[in-house]
Image (cartoon, grey):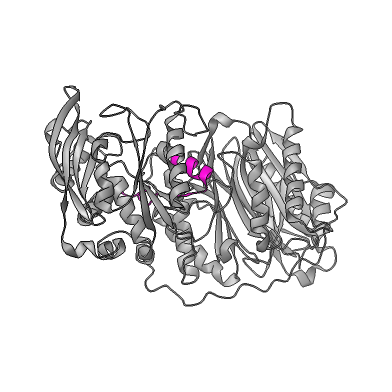
Amino acid sequence: MRVVALVSGGKDSCYNMMQCVIEGHQIVALANLRPEMKDELDSYMFQTVGHHGIDLYAEAMGLPLYRHTIQGSSKSIDKDYTITENDEVEDLFQLLKKVKEECDVDAVSVGAILSDYQRVRVEHVCQRLGLTSLAYLWRRDQEELLEEMIDSQLTAVLIKVASLGLEPKHLGRTLSEMHPYLQKMKDKYQLNVCGEGGEYETFTLDCPLFRKRIVLDEVESIIHSDDAFAPVAYLNIKRAHLEDKKVDDQNTSMLDRIKNLPMLQSFQLYSSLQLEDRITEDPEPACVRDGNPHPLADEEDWCSVFCDGDHVWITGLYGFHTESGNLGEITTQTMNKLKEALENLPAGQCDMSCVAMVCLYVQDMSMFAAVNSVYRTYFGINPPARICVEAALPTNVALQIDCYCNKSLPDRQTMHVQGLSHWAPANIGPYSQCVQVKNKLYVAGQIAMCPANLSIIRGGIVPQVRLSLRHVQRILEAMHCGMDKITTVVCYVTNISYVQTAKRELEASRASEETEEEFGVEKISSMPPVTIYVVVPSLPKAALTEWQVMARNDLCDINVKELTHNSQMGLFRCSLRFLYTDEEIISCAISIDGSIESVGDSLTKKVCECLAKLLCQASESLPNTITSRFPLRIFFCPSQLNTNELHQTINHDLELSWSKSKIPVVLVPVLQLSSPDLILAACS
């Protein structure tokens, strides 16, 4: 892509340019926001100290430099940003708008490492302008990153200090000179070695992308705050010049100048995942699509709304095929049903902003783009987390939606990263990577996309499973959670042969994060999550696996209950596993297996009766203090259970309940379950 690099003069913006080049992008212009008539501006968003030396960047790199004077201030300082008059973010918008118009750029290079505040605002501007944010330093390990910068021949000096352990005497020293001392201060004062806490700022004098190096001739040291413990001081660059570098550098491309440097690159993904000996040339073919021979009765409105305190579940939203076959119209009608269902709740209780998690099933993955184009119009800046898979839907159903909502918006946090990085994939649709409501986390479906370019990793099922699980792990870590806190997992695969690999890799991933026993609480490693594996026809981007994960930050006082039950004269073997507290069901798994041939007629009805009895037995065996509802997602094969009969029996005849309250049930038709003997698999 053609890239404009946002440059502050600091090490991060400069090194991210190098990362963009090594990933195959072309830097075509530089952009900078400068303060008006001041050496430094107290900005939440931009580094402004050192701005006097920015003009030299253009000549040093041989690129045009676009500058814009900051006229606004940090008016909107919330974690999310919306267009705000006279905010400094609008200055960034005007700057990048001009660059796009004149240089035809596709992307923006930004050196954010940990600042969600900065990332959110740059991504907001990029979204408005149709640009891609390239933030290859995002969430990198700071010690590793600083060492990598130094080893990659980036020369930068400290031009501002503002932290315990740093003094005015450190101004002007290079990163390589300061490296051991910064590490020492990290150990002593928990200083961020890359300065992400505002401990220090830098000015880059040279890097391999420069055709000339910058030499500081005259600087002025300014004491901004003479604090006894953490004085704030900065250098004002009064005079500087450019110095020619070796002739060899003048005739080589940017990429050629850095290709042999020890920089993190996307092709190193295999080694970082320890995959060198686990790659196969071709993946197993997807399972043969049997299809669903049963159309769903479309004369009935299957939509149901369940409320329990702040919790709202909406199930049974079906988009039926129409004569016109217009997917946009079908999606609009289905999403309008969802919106109306929320609006019909008591006034002011719930709306689309309360939706935390959406499960979207399509009849054919080729519908993905058309459905997305409509779906995105129903949500704002922080959409819900979402999974999207192709299911074995009835012949007359184009799409199926169910969702979980929570009315308690103040207790909601969202991870919604839209830029390319080495961390985890940006979203490829209108969804957030994770939504947390109180202590529960809902992670969007994760497939094995390479974060740097969003392509699916090659090499078969092992690389895909391992990478997609790493995405889950990193997203949870960013939300201050971990793999050891997972409560529910649904793993979608496109071939039954992938299930054992997925099981093995999930166990290994969780084992690497075993928690220590603390305050008498049992290790979570002895309390594995509820896990279900199902085979579906197709996944986004032709991925081989997708993970749907729920986690919970607080795992104190979790209990486990396992029940087995033989019914219908021993024809069915039923098992149930609950994770629960004295107040609520955290998660549950239900499986029913048996010999279909020996059951005879009315298989669907008998299975449903077995399920109802099992839930009744469980309700009686758990504490009577558990009165809250929990949703039940039932996976089944339409080649075994009749879709219409299953819907009718579950939704009308039996009405599955808990503590005398009907529970939300979602029916998901799939190609296969994880075992040939399984007739039904369900989870909460």
Could one spot residue 393 in this view of the protein?
A: yes
Residue 239 location, x and y as percent?
A: 16, 37
- Residue 402's x, y, as percent? 69, 47
**Quadrant for the N terminus in the image:** bottom left
Residue at 73% across, 53% down: 611
Task: Tell me if 200 is positioned left or right of 683 in this view.
Answer: left
In the image, residue 291 lies in the stretch drawn in magenta: no
Q: Position of residue 451 (x, y in %)?
A: 44, 57
What residue sits 86% from the left and 49% below the top?
A: 300
Q: Residue at x 35, y 30 (%)?
A: 43
Q: Is residue 103 above or below residue 658?
A: below
Looking at the rendering, the stretch of residues picked out in magenta corresponds to 121-142
Q: Quadrant of residue 20?
A: bottom left
**Based on the displayed image, in which of its 4 quarters is residue 89 positioned?**
top left
**Residue 139 covered by magenta stretch:** yes
Q: Position of residue 543 (x, y in %)?
A: 55, 65
